[in-house]
Amino acid sequence: MKIIMLGAPGAGKGTQAQMIADKYEIPHISTGDIFRENVKNGTELGMEAKKYMDQGALVPDELTVKILLDRVAKDDCKNGYVLDGFPRTIPQAEVLDNALNEIGEKIDYAINVDVPDENIIRRMSGRRACLSCGATYHIEHVPPKKEGICDRCGKELVLRDDDKEETVKNRLDVYHKQTQPLIDFYTKKGVLKTVDGTVDMKDVFAAITAILA
Ligand code: AP5
Ligand code: MG
C-alpha cells in the first residue's frame, strides 16, 4: 500500500503517518525528518536545506526528489510506504508518478488532512519534536511521559526552529501557493480522500483506517 499524506504544516501529517506506519507495518518516510536529521548531523545536504527551512521556504525540487527516490528504492519499501511531506509541488508529484509508472506501480491513496489556518498557528507553538527518531508530541494534547524526553528513544525534545510564529505564517503561505494544487492533481487521479484534521487525533486515525480498510 502506497500512501501520501497531504495537508498544511501542522495539520497532523506526521502524527497520522506514524500511526499508519505502525498499524500497517510500512515505513514512514518524511522528507522534513530526513532534512532535519541532516541538519543535526551537519551534512552538506543539511546545511543547504537549512537555508530554506529556516525561512519556511521549500527546499529546491532537485535536492528533494533525489533523496526521496533513493529512499523509496530501499528494500523495506517493497510492501509500500507512507510519504509525509512529499510531494509538495506539482513537479515533485510528476517525478514520483513517472518513477512509479516505470515499475508498473501507483499511489493508492492521497490522504488530505484538512485543518484551517487559524488552528495551525495555535498548534505549532505547543509542538515538541524528537530530532533523533522523528516522534512528535504536543505539550497539551500529546505530552511525553517525562517532560522534555522522547518516550520512544529517550533523547531530548525540542521546539523546531521553523515553528516560530512568523515562520509558520510563511510556511502556510508557501503551502497554499505550491502544495495545495496537489489536491486537484490527486483528485483527478481518483485517489484523493479528505479527513477532518481538527478532531481528536484518535478520531482522525479512525477516519483514515476506515478509508484504508
Ligand atoms: P515538514 O517537516 O514536512 O513540515 P510541515 O509540512 O510544515 O509539517 P509539520 O511537520 O510542521 O506538520 P505535520 O502535518 O507533520 O503535523 P504534526 O503531526 O507534527 O517540512 C519542514 C520543512 O522541510 C519545509 O518547510 C521545507 O523547507 C522542507 N521540506 C520538507 N519536505 C519537502 C519537500 N517535499 N519539498 C521541499 N521542501 C521540503 O502535528 C502538529 C502538532 O499538532 C503536533 O504537536 C501534534 O502533536 C499536534 N496534533 C496533531 N494532530 C492533532 C489533533 N488531531 N489534535 C490536536 N493536536 C494535534
Ligand atoms: Mg511533520
Image: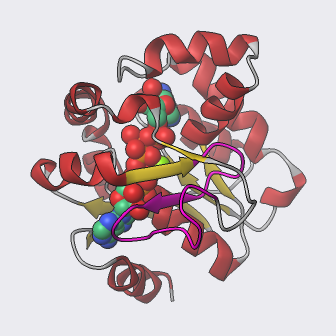
Task: Choose top left, top right, bottom left or bottom right for residue 67.
Answer: top right
- The residue at the point 53 percent across, 49 percent down is 129
User: Residue 147, image x and y in percent?
Assistant: 53, 62
**Magenta region includes residue 185:** no
Identify the colour scheme used: secondary structure
Magenta stretch, residue numbers: 130-149
Quarter of the image for residue 193 reads bottom left
Image quadrant where one finds the N terminus: bottom right
Which residue is drawn at the image coordinates 21% and 69% (left, top)? Answer: 198
Q: What residue is shown at x 65% (from left), y 48% (from top)?
A: 156
Which residue sits furthest left? 118
Q: Give the mark count.
A: 0
Q: Residue at x 74, y 59 (%)?
A: 154
Q: Quadrant of residue 65?
A: top right
Specify whether residue 78 is in view. yes
Question: Residue 96's spot in the image, x, y percent?
Answer: 58, 39
Q: In this view of the protein, which residue sits in the foreground, 11 or 182?
A: 11
Instruction: Give the image location of residue 197, x and y in percent.
Output: 27, 68
Decide if residue 87 is in sight here. Answer: no
Q: Magenta span: helix, strand or loop, mainly?
A: loop
* The residue positioned farthest toward the right in the image shown: 75
Does residue 21 appear to the left or right of 50 in the view shown?
right
Q: Is the residue 73 above or below the residue 2 in the image?
A: above
Left or right side of 35 for 42: right
Q: Which residue occupies the foreground of this view, 92 or 126? A: 126
Q: Left or right of 147: which side holds 199?
A: left
Q: Nearer the viewer, residue 74 or 166?
A: 166
- Above or below, 33 against 153 in this view is above
- How far across and down, in percent of the image, does residue 146 sit? 59, 68
Q: Is residue 132 magenta?
A: yes
Pick the front one: 34 or 98: 34
